[in-house]
Amino acid sequence: MNQALPPRAKFHHMKDGTQEDWNIIGAEFFEFRGEVSRRLKDHLLLLEGDCGGFPVDRLTHCLQTATLAHKDGKDEEYVVCALLHDIGDTLGPANHADVAAVLLEPYVSEANHWMVKHHAIFQGYYFFHYMGLDRNLRDQYKDHPHYAQTLEFIEKYDAPAFDPDAEYYELSFFEPMMERVFKEPRRSLYIKESA
């Protein structure tokens, strides 16, 4: 039994697109965007079992980080950022913080976005010198308005979240928070917001 395919745009080059084509694409886009939380959860699960030499696997580290932030009273958006801060490890091992930040950017505040984007440089304080790098690279941002928040994130939540004996909340605890944060973008990356 053949099922009817959903409607599709008819153009072969975007310059030939019509209003009808873009109505079809727009409807699909909003439905697809509504599933972003589920897709992020699926990708986060790829971190399970991957320790990368650390004392806990990457998923456990993310869950511990988010648990620490939640128990400390941080808001849902911050906790979701804590949960997803290393989601880029599988796709961008050389720039995992950038990958995570790009995924979060439309949905979170500028401060939380900046924190996730720069967390790798800030955490480098603990180990860069063992790799022949400058452990004080984060000092270049000392005058930035989000420096203190990022430093706190590293010191209180990210850096201590490698404890094999620590209790943490399961991913299912954070799923409703993810759904709320990713329900709708807070800011558009395509349309300049008016001041």
Image (tube, grey):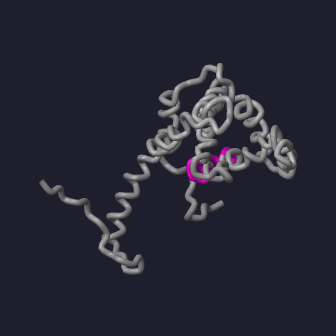
Q: Is residue 163 visible?
A: yes
Q: Position of residue 66 (x, y in %)?
A: 62, 31
Left or right of 55, for residue 169: left
The front one of 191 and 124 is 124
Q: Main secondary structure of the magenta part?
A: helix
Q: Is residue 104 magenta?
A: yes
Indicate left or right for 70 with 179 as reference: right
Q: Quadrant of the C terminus?
A: bottom right
Task: Tell me if residue 58 is in the magenta stretch.
Answer: no
Residue found farthest to the left: 1
- The quarter in which the N terminus is drawn is bottom left
In the image: residue 39, left or right of residue 92: left
Query: Residue drawn 70% across and 46% down?
Result: 111
Please tell me which residue is depicted at 30% across the width and 73% down the height of the picture: 10
Q: Is residue 18 left or right of residue 99?
A: left
**Compared to 57, does 115 lie above or below?**
below
Residue at the (67%, 44%) spot, across then down = 112
* 143 vs 78: above or below: below
Exactly how many numbered labels are in the figure? 0
Of 26 and 47, nearer the camera is: 47
Depth check: give the residue in front, 153 or 62.
62
Magenta-colored span: 101-112
Pick the front one: 41 or 192: 41
Which residue is depicted at the point 70% across and 31% down?
157
Give residue 145's position: percent from left, percent from top. Answer: 79, 48
